[in-house]
Image (cartoon, grey):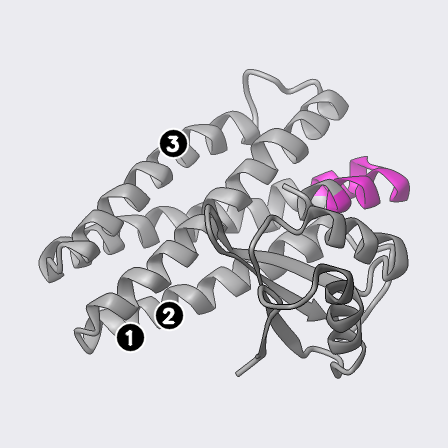
Amino acid sequence: MPTILDVREMVPKDRHSKIFDTYKKLGPGESFILVNDHEPKPLLYQFQAEHDGEFDWWPLEQGPQVWRVSVVKRESPGADRTITGYLQTDHRRLDGIYERFQSAVHAQRWDEAAADFREFSLGLRRHIRVEEEILFPVFEEKTGMHDSGPTFVMRMEHTEIKSLLDRILGSTEGRDANSVSSGSSSLMSILMDHNMKEEHILYPESDAFLSEAERKDVVKKSQAA
């Protein structure tokens, strides 16, 4: 289990030094969860300036009272990371959260299941936002494919995915196992094909079309989304 660093009771001037000290003590692939009382965007920008390509930054909860972020020290650091590598890592991370959710549902730990699914839903919605607001426009500009091609299809699938997220969360909070099972089957059916198209077509083609500087810019903007 990752270390949980709750800085809410700390004097503000001491927070960043404690956070970076905690990060520096991590081994490759290790992480900690930062708990804060405001959105830590300035902290992210400091990480990007001082540890470019060395870390991952995954929001787990975004207010209004509590913000939680998973900060990961990458196993293979490098500022020249690909879009494929960055977004595939997020896919795998979301898969892990979803597996926790399914285990909690199976054991009828409903409060835990709802918390896990809220975390999963926030992460997947953020992933979709990164694609639609950051990656897709760059891809479409490079390829000229605005009203056709992979991004057109993926936007339609995103709409269906977001609708299913709402449905499954409502069913989980209502402790309706049958409805959760039905919604989960529909979601997984879409996501398996959707993620495969992204990982085998959209992401590699984006890496091929973009320069190293452009790829780096997409990743940095994605971290702040």
Instruction: State the quadrant of the C terminus.
Output: top right
**Residue type (three-letter) at the residue carrying disc 1:** Ser
Rendering coords of residue 34 (x, y %): 61, 66
Q: What secondary structure is found at the residue carrying circle 2? A: helix
**Residue type (three-letter) at the residue carrying disc 3:** Thr
Q: Residue at x 84, y 37 (%)?
A: 214
Q: CA distance from mark 2 to mark 1?
A: 6 Å
**Discs 2, 1 touching: Cβ within 8 Å:** yes
Rendering coords of residue 210 (x, y %): 82, 37
- Quarter-of-image position of residue 157: top left
Q: What secondary structure is found at the residue carrying circle 1? A: helix
Within 10 Å of disc 2 (Cα), the crowding (few <14, some 14-19, many 20+) is some
Q: Kindly identify which residue carries mark 2.
A: 99
Q: CA distance from mark 3 to mark 2?
A: 23 Å
Q: What secondary structure is found at the residue carrying circle 3? A: helix
Question: Does residue 144 sit above or below 110 in this rendering?
Answer: above
Q: Kindly identify which residue carries mark 1.
A: 103
Q: Kindly identify which residue carries mark 3.
A: 159
Q: Residue at x 68, y 69 (%)?
A: 72
Within 10 Å of disc 1 (Cα), the crowding (few <14, some 14-19, many 20+) is few
Q: Which residues are magenta?
A: 205-220
**Residue type (three-letter) at the residue carrying disc 2:** Glu
Q: Assess whether residue 218 is covered by the magenta stretch.
A: yes
Rendering coords of residue 30 (x, y %): 67, 79
